[in-house]
Image (cartoon, helix red, strand yellow):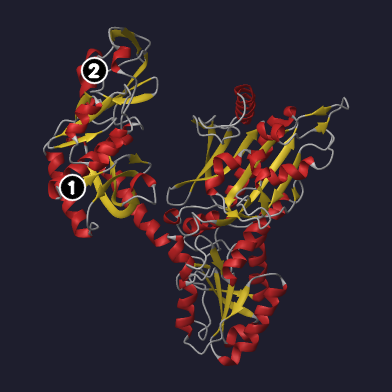
Amino acid sequence: MIAGPSAAAAADSMIVLTLPDGSTREVPAGTLARDVVATIGSRLLQASLAVAVDGEVQDLMTPLRASGAFVVITDKDPRALAVLRHSGAHILATAVRRLRPDAKIGFGPAIDDGFYYDFEVEKPFTPDDLAAFEAEMKKVVAEKYAFVRAEVNVAEAKKLFADDPLKLERLADFEGTDEIISTYTDGPFIDLCRGPHVPDTSHLKHFKLLHTAGAYWRGDVKRQMLQRIYATAFFKKDELETHLHNLEEAKKRDHRVLGKALGLFQLFPQAPGAAFWTPKGTTLYNTLEGFVRERQQEAFQEIKTPLLYNKKLWEQSGHWGKYKENMFLVLDNETGEHDMSLKPMNCPSHHVLFASHKHSYRELPVRYVTFDVLHRNELSGALSGLTRVRQFSQDDCHVYLREDQIESEVKFLMDFILSYYDTFGLKATLKFATRPEQRIGSDELWDRAEAALRAALDGTGRPYEMKEGDGAFYGPKIDFDVTDSIGRAWQLGTIQLDYNAPERFDLSYTGEDNAPHRPVVIHRAVSGSFERFIAILIEHFGGAFPLWLAPEQVRVIPIAIDYNDHAQQLVARMKAHGIRATLDARNETLNYRVREGEVEKVPYMCVLGRREAEEHTVALRARGAGKKQEILSQDAFVARVLEEIRTRALAVAAAPAADTGASGEGEA
């Protein structure tokens, strides 16, 4: 919003810009980016939206103040979309202020899938308001207002925004500094803003206002509630249409709606941020946890540690000073102080256990895993279904290893994580995150950790993206972002390399030389929290879980009371094989019961009539096959189900395209 070093610092000097072809342009500091682009070519200037100098994006109207690699950004560059969307936020604010001059303006950034703008108004916006704002935005776009940049000092800015208390509060942060304060004007609207912006409003051709939500001013629950308008924009119409289609699909798949409809979990105000799992939901949860246990039983050691600790542990780990506000503090009756805490993460407790006895170099790596319950004191306004909770469990692992084992261990853990995602049809993108601004440990330790983890990542040969400054406060990390069935990205697993914990907890092992040595710690998660992962799976599969994961795998439906015993025998047989089968012998019509099974997304329904009872067959309806049925012997059906569970097939085997026939009595 307010940017950069002082203008005086860059004045009266020359800068050198290196173009992608290796040629250079030497220009006075303060030259507008558009003027440099014009020297490259008029057609390029016409197509340009912004530029990047050493990777930092700025618009065409921002003065250039530093030498570096100079790249022109057009709509073909992925970075251009954020510039367009940020400009869309200003166009939205322009439209709102035209129709609602009383609206006080907050912030309007671009976000991953669109943009938003915050307004302070007496009454919440209505759907009719959004329709009017969108229509007005189209007028602003048609008027082709240029985004005009100006640089002012604090006093000048206060005069410009004398009627906007939110902006005045923001300006107060910069009293006594020599920061460059920039404003952008498009037509009648002026805003405090760092930029960058597209050249004019006409570039926003394909956009949509989506919905409104409440948002506390500056994210502070003690401050006033603002009205946030969410929107999105794309350069191409078909991209916008695809995005809107996916949003509609996401609504249908909303885990909060499906979770309740399928009877998996519920949320109650008596325990905000914690799920109540129903019998079906508990089955789903336990099946997922059992799958992780099964995969880890050979190479990992499962442990359980306490849930409550005194602050000495958190001071030792570094969390007390940096994470205390996110902990649930507990009063110690002896000291009268809130110096106990429910654990928000597992790592310190694992370090305590590892340090409690001696280890030989031959034992390493030691891999501790746990499924303990964790608690984090999330803001009530941030809670969202299962994706943002206060109580959760992780498939958490901490590996204690020698430095020479880092490369092989990272490859082992990476293969483990990626094959786990493959089971669910989730494809992952790897991202390497480096040291954040707020961190513990010396730069020397960070240099070693980053070099070691990056070398291990390079050694896998897998492509990855960089996330500068996004590492954990104790070490660099590899993040796994997965893409679900409707194209949404979710950050899930992580591999974090930690040189700080061994120092803080005085961890050691006895080396081949019989001397003590420091191990290295790797923090690893696969699902992240089970709660959030289940939410992702509900939406990824649309509630239609693969057979092995489905809480109810087979539903047996006798068409009349005469066949109840035969149906019950089939259910008992399947249960004996570990198949989660149920009997629906209610006094309802066959069509009603079949339809209910479809709504509840049961993978297989077996209809039993006279012929099926006599011939020991089933009229099988596979999920997604519509009314098509196939006749199978009970032996063949049970064998099919067991094989699909064993292989963890992603989808049930639907009936063939041509109907293979069905019992007249069994046909629904």
- Asked which secondary structure carries label 1, the reply is helix
Q: Which residue carries the number 1 mark?
A: 96
Instruction: Tell me the residue at 16%/53% (across/down).
Output: 132
Using the image as rendered, state which of residue 621 and residue 152 is in the foreground: 152
Q: Is residue 376 above or below residue 156?
A: below
Amino acid beneath label 2: Leu
Q: Position of residue 321 (x, y in %)?
A: 57, 39
Amino acid beneath label 1: Val
Question: In the shown orientation, is residue 469 left or right of residue 556?
Answer: left
Question: In the shown orientation, is residue 659 left or right of residue 195?
Answer: right
Q: Which mark is residue 32?
A: 2
- Asked which secondary structure carries label 2, the reply is loop
- Sort mark 2 into few (<14), some (14-19) or many (20+) by Cα contacts within 10 Å: some
Label 2 and label 1: CA atoms lie apart by 31 Å
Using the image as rendered, state which of residue 256 and residue 445 is in the foreground: 445
Q: Position of residue 360 (x, y in %)?
A: 85, 35
Q: Nearer the viewer, mark 2 or mark 1?
A: 1
Q: Quadrant of residue 403?
A: top right
Instruction: Tell me the residue at 36%/52% (across/down).
Output: 246
Q: Position of residue 229 (x, y in %)?
A: 28, 50
Q: Is residue 37 above or below residue 335?
A: above
Residue that extends furthest to the bottom in the rendered view of this protein: 562
Using the image as rendered, state which of residue 271 and residue 128 is in the foreground: 271
**Which quadrant is home to the N terminus?**
top left
- Sort mark 1 into few (<14), some (14-19) or many (20+) by Cα contacts within 10 Å: many
Q: Which mark is residue 520?
A: none
Instruction: Tell me the residue at 52%/83% (across/down).
Output: 666
Using the image as rendered, state which of residue 558 and residue 335 is in the foreground: 335
